[in-house]
Image (cartoon, rainbow, N blue to C red):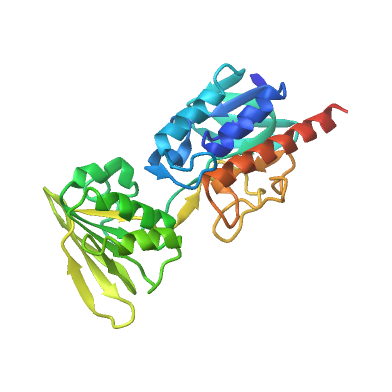
Amino acid sequence: MSTFDAAIIGSGPAGITAALYLARSGCSVILFENLAAGGQILQTEVLENYPGFPKGIKGYELADLFAAHIEGLTIERSRDAVDSVRGQVGNFVVSAGEKEYACRTVIVCTGAKHRPLGVEGEDRLQGRGVSYCALCDGNFYRNQPVAVVGGGNSALEESLYLAKIASKVYLIHRRNSFRGAQIYQDKLAALSDKVELVLDSVVDGLQADLIAGLTGVVVRNVVTGEQRPLKVNGLFVYVGMEPRTAFLPPEVERDAQGFLVTDTEMRTSVPGIFAAGDVRSKLCRQAVTAAGDGATAAQAAFVLMEQLHA
């Protein structure tokens, strides 16, 4: 069984930063990454608020820079999905694929996945009209009408992106005002000819054709109860996130939504297990805060390992 000072699970901004800091500190590191380095920023067209890039930077470009920053460092890489973490501080065992790895500390940077709407037919229509990534799938709906559901930054950002591609964008939100940044709201207001706001409304049903896939959605106004059909070929869902934590033992404390509870040093309730990035219970989930979490978790793990040596 291979032995490492730290197992870092996830290779988004948090995981890459943690690996960078620990490898530069001389620690032996294994980095588990199911996809390419970068995590969810690979699904983001442009980051406009990442420091150092005043004109913005493409998500894939920033991901490439993250990956380049750890090139040449002694970091073991694994594409296997982590199945479980067991043991105690100084003696954890991480199971992934058909292998097991002994690790003194574990840093969880697995992020979160998009929460589904929960309407009938949503699962069946994934890839046939229903999507959770406009950057990935938007081009399939070029010059076609689409709908976006949500009221946060992700929904607003993706609506702006889709407005460049689709013939029409319906932005559906259950409230009469958005949570997303004002700068995005202002940009959407300037596109009123292309983007129609459908406020105080929820998606009640999906309409589909056996061959064509999604053909429309039925929205209901939560104030009046009135239903309205919208003819769309694509539905992009941004109604929150669910953390990826199923592989962790139940002793690791979660909040009511399932996100991992940590202190300011990224320590979870289980000594030796740290959490960083979107998987944490916190207010702001952004690439820049994930990178900061990763640096803090790495430093806290390094200090703990020094104490274990003493």
In x, y percent, where is residue 57? 43, 39
Q: What residue is shown at x 69% (from left), y 47% (from top)?
A: 268
> Would you say residue 150 is visible in this rendering?
no
Residue shown at the point (22%, 75%) measured from the top left: 227
Is residue 222 or residue 105 the one in the foreground? 222
Name the image quarter holding the N terminus.
top right
Find residue 67 and report its horizontal and vertical position in percent. 50, 26
Where residue 155 sits, quadrant-wise, is bottom left
Residue occupying the point 57% across, 24% down = 70
Single out the residue that lies furthest toward the bottom.
Answer: 224
Of 39 and 116, nearer the camera is: 39
Quadrant in the rendering for residue 104: top right
Residue closer to the observer: 146 or 78: 146
Side (left or right) of 153 relative to 16: left
Q: Residue 277: x and y, percent? A: 57, 45
Q: Could one spot residue 72 in this view of the protein?
A: yes
Left or right, 252 with reference to 164: right
